[in-house]
Image (cartoon, rainbow, N blue to C red):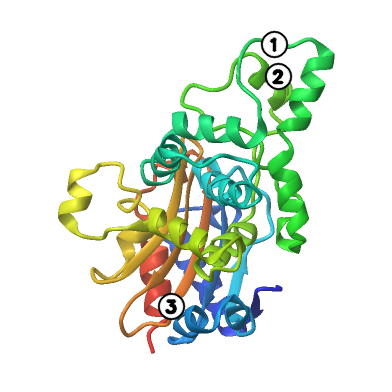
């Protein structure tokens, strides 16, 4: 892939780990998973921050994937895309910054608020939800809702081909024009691959998409506390039951999780003393996987140990 070099040893580690997790009582796990795992030299991110984004991209990490190019429903992981898009719109002066926008972004990422995400999608696209529209108006509405996809295509990254990020996220589901926009068979649902999410998250961490100050703002929203007290105070902390729960206590974590009745996902960048920094994106599908609170922590724990140096 363009943003990391393939490592056969890491690919073997992934395959052996998935096989072992299947034998623990998860038949068919390999078909339910997409994973992208990239590790970096310990000083690589520090050098990048000192020398600029080009230095980071000039030293690609080593990595491996399992079904990394497969498109899956991303659940709330799509909120990472919308976060980056907002900063891109602000940079082009297509949006006006302000406290309410910043409150919505914080709630969208830190608390995974669907209500906040709805406002963000409205602002990005210039559309609103509501009752069904006549055909001519609906056509214009649909065109506006493709603006984030147009921006993704404009980045020119091969990992983003086939991705779809145009829908709001819901509690009970879409109604009215939003339901019509999904299509009769829900064929217009959001879809992302673990490779696409990995490249987007890495670009934020490397300050290699939009401006460095904007990337710093995004990293601040994405950082998660692993402290037990903080996690206990927030039952929906996006750590417990996800990748962060499998990390050493003193690790630093930047992440965005996604969870619904048929999926449990997470996208994380991790720095831990004695380990190579690494990026790990895991998509897991199916009702059994959505309820499986041990799978993502087990994956993170094993792959983190493999990054020891």
Q: Can you see residue 131? A: yes
- Label 2 to label 1: alpha-carbon separation: 8 Å
Q: Is residue 239 above or below residue 112?
A: below
Residue at image location 61% in from the left, 14% down from the top:
130
Residues 61 and 206: in front is 206
Q: How many marks?
A: 3
The answer to the question of whether label 2 and label 3 lie on touching residues, with beta carbons closer than 8 A, is no
Badge 1 local density, few (<14 within 10 Å), some, or many (20+)?
some
Quadrant the N terminus occupies: bottom right
Residues 289 and 98: in front is 98
Quadrant the C terminus occupies: bottom left
- Label 3 to label 1: alpha-carbon separation: 48 Å
In-image side of 308 versus 49 (left or right): left
The image quarter in which residue 126 lies: top right
Q: Farthest residue toward the left?
A: 229
Residue 32: x, y in percent?
A: 57, 51
Disc on res. 258: none
- Disc 1: which residue: 132
The image quarter in which residue 125 lies: top right
- Disc 3: which residue: 277
Residue at image location 76% in from the left, 45% down from the top:
150
Looking at the image, is mark 2 or mark 3 earlier in the sequence? 2
Residue 41: x, y in percent?
A: 48, 86
Residue at image location 69% in from the left, 59% down from the top:
69
In-image side of 197 versus 40 (left or right): right
Determine whether the residue tagged by mark 3 lies in a helix, strand or loop.
loop
Disc on res. 180: 2
Looking at the image, is mark 2 or mark 1 earlier in the sequence? 1
């Amino acid at each position: 892939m363009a943003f990391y070099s393939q490592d056969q040893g890491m690919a073997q580690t992934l395959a052996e780990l998935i096989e072992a997790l299947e034998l623990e009582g998860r038949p068919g796990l390999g078909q339910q998973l997409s994973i992208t795992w990239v590790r970096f030299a310990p000083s690589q991110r520090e050098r990048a921050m000192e020398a600029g984004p080009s230095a980071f991209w000039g030293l690609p990490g080593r990595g491996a994937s399992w079904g990394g190019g497969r498109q899956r429903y991303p659940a709330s992981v799509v909120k990472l895309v919308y976060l980056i898009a907002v900063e891109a719109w602000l940079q082009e002066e297509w949006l006006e910054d302000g406290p309410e926008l910043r409150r919505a972004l914080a709630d969208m990422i830190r608390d995974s608020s669907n209500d906040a995400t709805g406002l963000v999608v409205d602002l990005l696209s210039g559309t609103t939800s509501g009752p069904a529209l006549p055909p001519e108006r609906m056509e214009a509405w649909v065109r506006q809702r493709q603006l984030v996809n147009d921006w993704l295509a404009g980045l020119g990254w091969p990992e983003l081909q086939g991705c779809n990020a145009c829908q709001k996220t819901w509690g009970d589901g879409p109604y009215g024009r939003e339901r019509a926009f999904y299509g009769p068979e829900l064929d217009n649902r959001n879809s992302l691959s673990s490779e696409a999410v990995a490249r987007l998250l890495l670009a934020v961490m490397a300050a290699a998409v939009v401006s460095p100050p904007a990337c710093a703002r995004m990293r601040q929203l994405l950082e998660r506390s692993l402290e037990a007290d903080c996690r206990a105070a927030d039952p929906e902390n996006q750590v417990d039951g996800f990748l962060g729960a499998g990390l050493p206590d003193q690790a630093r974590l930047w992440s965005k999780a996604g969870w619904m009745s048929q999926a449990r996902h997470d996208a994380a960048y991790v720095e831990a003393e004695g380990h190579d920094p690494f990026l790990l994106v895991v998509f897991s599908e199916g009702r059994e996987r959505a309820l499986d609170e041990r799978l993502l922590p087990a994956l993170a724990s094993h792959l983190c140990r493999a990054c020891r140096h």
